[in-house]
Image: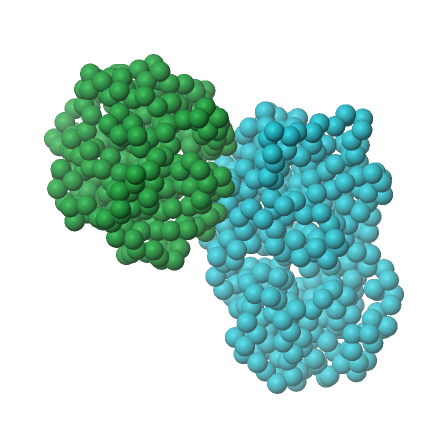
Amino acid sequence: MITDSRRTTWTHALGRRRRALYLSSPIGLGHAQRDVALADELRTLHPDLEIDWLAQHPVTAVLESRDERIHPLSAELASESAHIAAESAGHDLNAFQAIRRMDEILLANFMVFHDVVTDGEYDLVIGDESWDVDHYWHENPELKRTAFAWLTDFVGWLPMPEGGEREAYLTADYNAEMIEHVERFPRIRDRAIFVGEPDDIVPDAFGPGMPLIRDWTERHFAFSGYVTGFDPAPLIEGREDLRRELGYRPDQRVVIVTVGGSGVGEALLRLVIASYPDAARRVNGLRMIAVAGPRIDPSTLGAQPGVEIRPFVPSLYRHLAACDLAVVQGGLTTTMELAAARRPFLYFPLRNHFEQNRHVRYRLDRYGAGRCMDYATSTPEVIAEAIAAEIDRPIDYRPVETDGAARAAALIAPLL
Amino acid sequence: MVPAPDAVLASRPPGTSSGTGHGSREQHRARYPDITGFVERDGVRVFYEVYGSGEPTILLLPTWSIIHSRLWKLQIPDLARRSRVLTFDPRGNGRSDRPVSVDAYAETEFAADALAVMDATRTERAVIVSLSLGAQRALLLAADHPERVAGAVFIGPALPIAPPITARAQIKGFTEPLESDAGWAKYNSHYWRRDFRGFLEFFFGECFSEDHSTKPTDDAVAWGLETDPESLILTELAPGLTSRDEVLDLCARTRCPVLVIHGREDRIRPHAHGEELARATGGTLMTIEGAGHIPNVRDPVRVNLAIRDFVNALAGGGA
């Protein structure tokens, strides 16, 4: 922020509005939705609360549509999503190594954040997987000058088999550093919230000879339940109306294929589109809609007669709630939207992505939701077969919590 | 008055390579240079980058050619938000040439490269920041070209100004075959030719002696593999600052403000080196307890804030 150093203002403490700075991770599209839901709940509890967002694309797109206050220094943040896209190849993203190789970007963004909180008179920083703030405040505890609420939907870096012994060593070392940080400086995370329930936590240890992730997380976190960011009940109850509104005829069986907003996922889109002719022979009235997202050129996807390719679908979650089956990546947000909306779905975790293959899969198994597919062995025929088998599957998922945002806000509100 | 650039300005888009250096799979950067180019002196091409536009200019000097300018990757994006930042790859690594004569790696050549880069980028004056061996070229610049140096930050300076670490001093004969490869005996030309990676892993393991330093170590080893043992052997044999008196003379002639940052647990150059340099230059000493040899990588927040404060104080003091 440009300021004239010859003019300064200081406000009496009791004359100040409550102010929070909210950081919402731009990795994946899901954080924005849950974070604005949480922000709304916090404003209900503290009507005078003013929230600034330090955010980047694609989170800013969601914030702008709601006229949220985006801090001007947001423009100086280095792009995390561009880095993640650069780290992925085909249907492969080693998420641990990608975060590890993001050290330069995380540090650069922490320094921007540091300037924002130094000048901002904030009471509270809310960090939804803001790895930079959590790490560097633990490394530089004297720089912390506000309360800090930390949110995450997974705890623990886990190695993938292809990474071998080296990756197992590295993930354990990263976990050990995090544990040392948190145990030495409990004053950094004034409130740590696990977005989920204890039963969502994988049964693994942090590494050889280290604590079980679940035990440790139960000692150091509070639990909000899952935060969907929308109420699925009206969508489930009004599904026939929703289908009419979206133009899905009763005799159509609508399959939506989507890979989220990043460039990662083009290979999966192409593969699923190629399965359409076979799937259409097996399922009467099959209509396939492939959502390419803003970063994928639809002309590269191998058009098939009968498949509609759309660059962008507003309020995608409503389409997902209305469809007969969805085919998606293994990211937490979209799969949990489908679980909440009680729709059948196939999900393909990105190869070498520890969060999608381990944490998310474990959680979905607990809800009994979706069918996990292996990209490497899924031919178009395998996918067509799975679509036909799953599309009429009776839904017996464990219901997804609907009060997660309110619970998280109630945990954070006392800090303000 | 800034001399007209006599160097070749060869701007190229970020991420492209002249064929050497900066690895085939460099990780995505937080910020890419606004201008890149080469300066050429005596047939040796040196690659430089320019970031940002604010005042003053900060020149992040190369250190020993065992690594290149990515060494500063945690400083560049932060400092370039306010200042113009220059970096260049040392001869022998990165996108700079690998000359094959010993004399091409003399300390005076690195100092002359720095001046050539400043000329090519029309930089009259800069705050210079150095790490380890970079202290030698920094000191030459500060003492001999005071009009070009507004201030100097030395991190873990490597100067013959205090006794070396004992384990290292006990190993003699860089070019003689040794019977052992244990520890500092790896600091030997025969071992470098036999197992260059083994040397890099040992050396950077000593540099990053702090726990949880796998990423900095991996980065540095990868940058080290962008040069080769023969080039690095030449740097070791080339003339540099060798006597304490010579260094003290340079310190006495250094008039600009000086900040020395030194880790207490430095296993490459003992903390006493930093203390002595700060004393001899009348500079400020910032000790980082628990830190090893490369705190700008291992403690980047603290070091960046210290550089910012140093630069701000220069501006405030009318330097």
Q: Position of residue B72 (x, y in %)?
A: 39, 39
**Residue B166 found in image quarter:** top left
Q: Position of residue A257 (x, y in %)?
A: 65, 70
Q: Nearer the viewer, residue B92 or A88?
A: B92
Q: Residue at x 56, y 68 (%)?
A: A296
**Is residue A128 visible in the rendered structure shown here?**
no
**Residue A371 found in image quarter:** bottom right
Which chain is displayed in cyan in the rendered image?
Answer: A
Total marks shown come to 0
Q: Residue at x 59, y 76 (%)?
A: A273
Q: Nearer the viewer, residue A65 or B102?
A: A65
Q: On the rendered structure, is A395 left or right of B110?
A: right
Q: Residue at x 50, y 36 (%)?
A: A173
Q: Position of residue B65 (x, y in %)?
A: 26, 39
Colour of chain B, in one word, is: green
Q: On the rendered structure, is A414 left or right of A374?
A: right
Q: Nearer the viewer, residue A189 or B271?
A: B271
